[in-house]
Amino acid sequence: MTNISGNLHKEGLTPPVVEPEEFDPVELLFKAQNRFNWSLEQFAISFGWEVSTIQKWKERQKFSRQARIRAATLKREWERDYGF
């Protein structure tokens, strides 16, 4: 079977699909606490998730791909803006 989208991309008819960067949100929490002296609540507000959800991440290290993408986005922004 032929990969239609792959052939269209080779012919210049479609843009390539680029996977977004991902980062561990719990690691980002620890970095934010060290760099900005943030509480869990302050991080949750910035991250856009509930405190209870982030507490569950800390306990089980199980988070969604969406959370990993959000963490990568914030990490990149904080590195750019604050030398994170």
Image: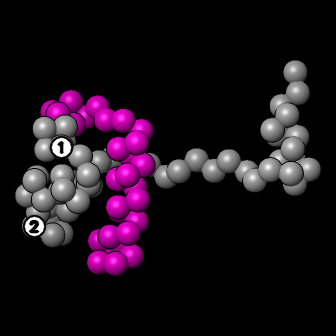
Residue at (20% x, 62% y) in the render: 32
Give the number of the mark in front: 2 or 1. Answer: 1
Q: Is residue 61 magenta?
A: yes
Whether residue 78 can be seen here: yes
Q: Is residue 21 magenta?
A: no
Compared to residue 72, the image places residue 4 above or below, namely: above
Magenta: main secondary structure: helix
Residue at (37% x, 52% y) in the render: 70
The region drawn magenta spans 56-84
Q: Is residue 24 left or right of residue 4?
A: left
How many marks do you count on the picture? Answer: 2
Return the residue at label 2. 37
Return the residue at label 1. 50
Residue at (12% x, 59% y) in the render: 42
User: Mark 2: which secondary structure?
Assistant: loop
Q: CA distance from mark 2 to mark 1?
A: 19 Å
Q: Residue furthest top?
A: 1
Label 2 Cα crowd, 10 Å radius (few <14 / some 14-19 / many 20+): few
Q: In the rendering, at what x and y percent does residue 63 appear? A: 31, 35
